[in-house]
Amino acid sequence: MTVTWSDGIDVIIGGDLVVALGYRTRAGGVVVQAVAPVGLRDRERGTLGFTTSLGFSKKLERIAADPRVALAFHTRRHGTALTSEYVLAQGTARVIEKPSAAERERVRTNATAHLGPPKQGVFWDRWLREYYQVRVPVDVGVQRLIIWPQLDAAGPPTVSGDPFPDHAPEPQRPPRNGTAPRIDVARAARRLRATEHTLLGFAGADGSPIVIPVAIGRDDPSGIILTSAVELPPGGRRAGLLGHSFKPQLIGLEARQHTGWMEVAADRSIRYAPHTETGYKAPANKTLLLLLNGALAKQGVRKARKAGAAGI
């Protein structure tokens, strides 16, 4: 079944500057990352897209191992759409490791429209070579589209495509190393509160990632209290947590990513125990940002080649 969408939703998909990508881990959890969709989509085929780098081999390996992903259109910040719907697309991802000239030009044209023209010249062409050359599109065939009327995912959603399973996902088996936090909870909570958007990801009953907006509440040594307008399945499970902020054209991007254990009690309270943390804060200056992007891309490509990643 080809899942398509209305003109109003297409404006959101084509206009949001950042979306949250949720993808599966081998342990049954979900990682949530901020990615740039740059308006990539095909309504007739029922596909959405985003761009990534072949240098991020771990993410690509996980998507190759389990292509079930979700894209959450969760903020109109610095985008072109003005409506308030929260749009979650679940589907199957395909990394286009060797895009055609037409596909590269499409990405370049869309990226210029959303992020501004690329730096060019003898120095910049050399410095950003890996950043642009190994940046590839990812095609997501939409199998289910869930739309909430508000950005906080409040209110009853409408569902297109595959119906939701008629049962909640079962609680998962706790990790062998236990469910308690493994990093400094107070510091993690403080950093998350400093970001503008926070999203939680976990596997649904059919295994597809679910990514929803949450708010960061109080914290103590046992974890961070989260609140959500969406009623979450009871019990414990692996979950990913993302906090991020960004300025126009993705300048000044900040992201804090966690994997950990989520416990939903009988009273619907949500406690999150972070196990891992990664993050970065990019300069709020485009020239400095591109210098950093170029350096990171070169480093990522070197690591990926050493690990034997395909396509590099």
Image: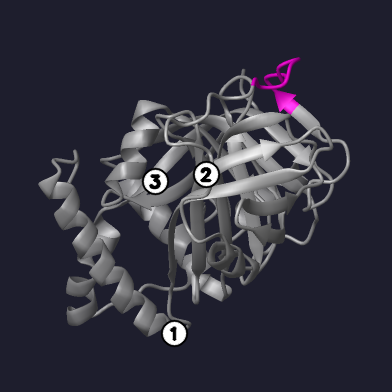
Q: Residue at x 53, y 24 (%)?
A: 173
Disc sitting over residue 260 in the figure: 2
Q: Amino acid at mark 2?
A: Gly
Tell me if residue 165 is in the magenta stretch.
yes
The kind of secondary structure element at disc 3 is strand
* Residue 86 on image: x %, y %: 74, 47
Q: Is residue 172 visible?
A: yes
Residue closer to the observer: 58 or 42: 58
Q: Of the numbered discs in the image, which one, if any, rests on residue 301?
A: none
Please give the name of the residue rendered at 28% of the width and 40% of the height, measured from the top-left corner: 97
Which residue ends up furthest to the top in the rendered image? 166
Which badge, 1 or 3, is on the more N-terminal residue?
A: 3
2 vs 138: above or below:
above
In the rendered view, does 282 fall on the left or right side of 303? right
- Does 262 appear above or below 295? above
Q: Looking at the picture, which amino acid does disc 1 mark?
A: Asn
Q: Amino acid at mark 3?
A: Pro
Q: Mark 1 — residue?
A: 285
Q: Earlier in the sequence, mark 1 or mark 2?
A: 2
Dominant SS type (magenta): loop
**Foreground: disc 1 or disc 2:** 2
Secondary structure type for disc 1: loop
> Any mark on residue 137, and which?
3
Q: Is residue 202 left or right of residue 154?
A: left
The magenta stretch spans which residues? 160-170
